[in-house]
């Protein structure tokens, strides 16, 4: 494997770090949090601990001002790497490589909740939940969990009030708790929602009427907003403004987007590599998605004509004008994809790129001048990592029989020359076994994510280990 920056290229050895079993990681994390003197509790889905995790992540509740100490505890665990950090007004999500509770995956998401509420308006005080938390033990792991009443409220309102949908997974347990502790539940909800609205919600849950529970969303939100503005006007307005500022940044700025471009001549196994990477990269970001080579324009047309299968000299290129227009439209689509997203963090694994047009113009039916494609390419958005699948010319010829020897040599050199001008890249020998290439690509991606996460944490907290 060769890797480098814009200035250098060097050989590297691909190591395969040990994946820490979930039970060992959980024990190490709870001990690290205790050493930091943090009082934290696992919010839900702990019934299978220490070996199984019944959720997609692990949710911890902490005092919001102690987030830096929680991260310091997390980063102190041996063989665990932080590969992503995404902060919302109420929760900080940390993505780890080196452990998982899901077979075939190597990453895990940890969420640190600092506010139990909506748009900066809490429905339960964090300090009260932590004070009344109950000690629980599972194997060698000791941790705190919310009281049954608090856990039921959190399990219901985290989705109902915040997202306006009822999470059926938790509803049976919530209903049992509301039945057995009705007066206590109403007492806990009344300060934030008022007695009438709280009682209406509790009765709807006890009756098991999902439609009535959904009908409570509007009154719950209105009561919470009105009471928060009445009793804490400055804090509420400040919290709402901060919420929308952060959400705008998350949805429409590219700082949370991480893109890996996998390029190479035909027959190098780009598609197969991506298909093997996607499962093991799950939980290394909030969303891990594959973008196919044939992206589509906003109006539904294929981006650069109909991509030809292989290198066919008989394939008729588009006209000069259409080719140049498509080059501009492709580049516009690249930029549009950088600014419109739905999640933070989003990891995209993409096959091919705009630059394939002038490296292999026949495949994309590009009939315009090469200098124009190169000029437009100068305005490309920056991608986090380029992976070039390279192989000797004779290997390329064997995998693509219609590829002429001189064309195989030309494409290989064009791709190598191009990728070495990128800021961060790796060149992998595609003639190696597919499993080896996959491991090398995985290591390169994890290194890139970890370096970026480290910069993000330094910028946020001012110290590498904080």
Image (cartoon, helix red, strand yellow):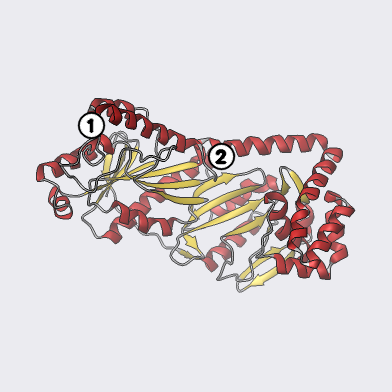
Classify mark 2: helix, strand or loop.
helix
In three-dimensional space, the C-alpha distance between marks 2 and 1, rounded to whole angstroms, equals 37 Å
**Disc 1: CA contacts within 10 A as few (<14), some (14-19) or many (>=20):** some
Image mark count: 2
Left or right for 160, reference 193: left
Left or right for 222, reference 278: right
Q: Position of residue 57 (x, y in %)?
A: 57, 59
Q: Picture quarter containing residue 399?
A: bottom left
**Taking 236 as reference, is 196 above or below it?**
below
In the picture, the quarter occupied by the C terminus is top right
Work out which residue is located at the far left of the displayed protein and give it.
405
**Taking 218 as reference, is 44 above or below it?**
below
Q: Position of residue 167 (x, y in %)?
A: 67, 60
* Residue depicted at 33% across the width and 40% down the height: 353
- Which residue is tagged 2? 251
* Residue depicted at 70% across the width and 63% down the height: 144
**Disc 2: CA contacts within 10 A as few (<14), some (14-19) or many (>=20):** some
- Which residue is tagged 1? 367
Classify mark 1: helix, strand or loop.
loop
Disc with the residue nearer the chain's start (2 vs 1): 2
Image mark for residue 347:
none
Q: Are marks 2 and 1 in contact (CB under 8 Å)?
A: no
């Amino acid at each position: 494997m060769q890797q480098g920056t814009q200035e250098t290229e060097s050989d590297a050895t691909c190591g395969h770090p040990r994946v820490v079993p979930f039970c060992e990681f959980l024990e190490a994390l709870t001990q690290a949090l205790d050493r930091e003197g943090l009082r934290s509790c696992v919010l839900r889905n702990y019934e299978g601990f220490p070996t199984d995790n019944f959720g997609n992540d692990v949710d911890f509740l902490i005092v919001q001002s102690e987030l830096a100490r929680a991260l310091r505890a997390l980063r102190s665990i041996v063989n665990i790497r932080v590969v992503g950090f995404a902060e919302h007004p109420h929760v900080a999500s940390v993505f780890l490589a080196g452990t998982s509770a899901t077979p075939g995956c190597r990453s895990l998401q940890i969420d640190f909740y600092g506010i139990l509420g909506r748009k900066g308006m809490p429905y339960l005080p964090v300090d009260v939940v932590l004070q009344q938390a109950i000690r629980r033990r599972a194997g060698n792991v000791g941790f705190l969990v919310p009281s049954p009443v608090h856990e039921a409220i959190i399990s219901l309102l985290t989705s109902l009030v915040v997202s306006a949908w009822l999470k059926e997974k938790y509803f049976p347990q919530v209903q049992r708790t509301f039945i057995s502790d009705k007066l206590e539940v109403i007492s806990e909800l009344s300060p934030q929602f008022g007695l009438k609205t709280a009682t209406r919600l509790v009765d709807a849950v006890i009756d098991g009427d999902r439609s009535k529970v959904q009908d409570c969303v509007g009154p719950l939100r209105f009561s919470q907003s009105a009471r928060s503005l009445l009793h804490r006007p400055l804090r509420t307005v400040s919290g709402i403004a901060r919420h929308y500022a952060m959400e705008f940044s998350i949805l429409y700025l590219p700082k949370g987007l991480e893109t890996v471009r996998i390029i190479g001549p035909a027959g190098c196994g780009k598609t197969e590599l991506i298909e093997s990477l996607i499962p093991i990269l799950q939980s290394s970001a909030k969303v891990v998605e594959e973008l196919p080579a044939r992206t589509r324009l906003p109006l539904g047309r294929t981006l650069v004509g109909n991509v030809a299968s292989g290198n066919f000299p008989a394939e008729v290129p588009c006209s000069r004008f259409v080719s140049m227009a498509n080059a501009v439209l492709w580049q516009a689509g690249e930029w549009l994809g950088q600014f419109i997203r739905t999640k933070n963090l989003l990891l995209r694994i993409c096959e091919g790129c705009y630059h394939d047009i002038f490296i292999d113009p026949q495949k994309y039916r590009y009939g315009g001048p090469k200098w124009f494609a190169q000029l437009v390419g100068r305005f490309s958005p920056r991608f986090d990592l380029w992976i070039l699948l390279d192989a000797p010319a004779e290997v390329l010829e064997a995998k693509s029989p219609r590829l002429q020897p001189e064309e195989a040599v030309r494409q290989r050199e064009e791709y190598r020359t191009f990728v070495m001008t990128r800021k961060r890249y790796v060149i992998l020998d595609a003639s190696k076994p597919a499993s080896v290439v996959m491991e090398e690509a995985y290591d390169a991606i994890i290194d890139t994510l970890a370096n970026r996460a480290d910069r993000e944490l330094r910028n946020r907290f001012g110290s590498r280990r904080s």
